[in-house]
Amino acid sequence: MASGYLHGHAESVLRSHRTRTAANSAAYLLGRLRPGLSLLDIGSGPGSITADLARLVAPGRVAAMETSEEILALTRAGVAAAGGPEVDYLVGDVHALDLPDDCFDVVHAHQVLQHVADPVRALREMVRVCRPGGVVAVRDGDYGAFAWFPASPGLDRWLELYRAAARATGGEPDAGRRLLGWAHAAGCRRVTASSSTWCYADPESRTAWGEGWADRILHSAVATQLLASGLADADELAAISAAWRDWSAQDDGWFSLLHGELLIHV
């Protein structure tokens, strides 16, 4: 599915991903869901969004897809912990889905296309397995449009390094702004484009986001990639970690993440 999933699945990453829900991560899709629909959730991760989607379309079936059984085990555990309807589990590659044409009413992918080698090919595959009258829903962050306060040279450097590392692994960190163009390149013309944000400004969310990245920049696949590629050394990553903690301790700290969203009408 991915060229090389930059974030990996360290606990610092999973803590953040487990806070994702259908409400805060797929609001643009919810109006198209109803009981009885079948849904494929590509890149299901720790399963928090998957479990919500399964409740919304029950008694319709949801299939969760990941790139390996190891990662899919995280989805299974998350869905089981959430309770609710049963989910089917698939290992697959979004570039070449081992599925027949027209087999799902909804195909959903959250924060996937920014990591794949060929997002246009991926979208064509997602459309192929979606039934006529159904919808393909994708949402991706746009790192180049992230904004924060107060100003922080350490966070400036974090963003510069993250974008470089993402592109070094074959991804596109500014995917949000490119989704519509990728859909057009995939031959999709009936498309509804939108955007939304996550904002971390209250003490609880600011601390979780800042402390999470302070940990992630030292102990995750992101850190491993930066060190292995020579883009940064351990001292620089430690300084960036400290900058994240400094930012999260600011009473007026504010961070906004822009996402692009698409509904492709099949």
Image: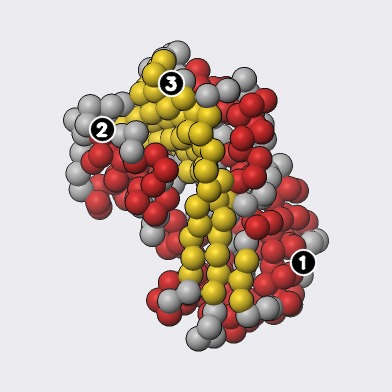
**Badge 3 local density, few (<14 within 10 Å), some, or many (20+)?**
many
Q: Distance between the residues labelled 1 and 2?
A: 48 Å
Image quadrant occupied by the N terminus: top right
Q: Is residue 22 left or right of residue 266?
A: left
Residue type pointed to by label 1: Ala
Residue 167 got which mark? Answer: none
- Report which residue position mark 1 lands on: 232
Which numbered mark, 1 or 2, is in the foreground of this view? 2
Disc on the earlier residue, 3 or 2: 2
| Residue 224 appears in view | no
Image x and y of residue 110, in percent: 48, 43
Image x and y of residue 107, in percent: 43, 30
Image x and y of residue 173, in percent: 66, 50
| Residue 252 appears in view | yes
Local secondary structure at mark 3: strand
Q: Which residue is drawn at 73% across and 48% down?
A: 167
Q: Distance between the residues labelled 3 and 2?
A: 16 Å
Residue 167's place in the image compared with 204, above or below, is above
Q: In this view, does 194 lie to the left or right of 22?
A: right
Front in this rendered view, residue 111 or 260: 260
Residue type pointed to by label 2: Arg
**Badge 1 local density, few (<14 within 10 Å), some, or many (20+)?**
some
> How does the figure colour the protein chain or chains?
secondary structure
- Report which residue position mark 2 lands on: 34
- Report which residue position mark 3 lands on: 130
Disc on the earlier residue, 3 or 1: 3
Q: Is residue 196 left or right of residue 74?
A: right
Local secondary structure at mark 1: loop
Q: Which residue is drawn at 24% across and 51% down?
A: 82
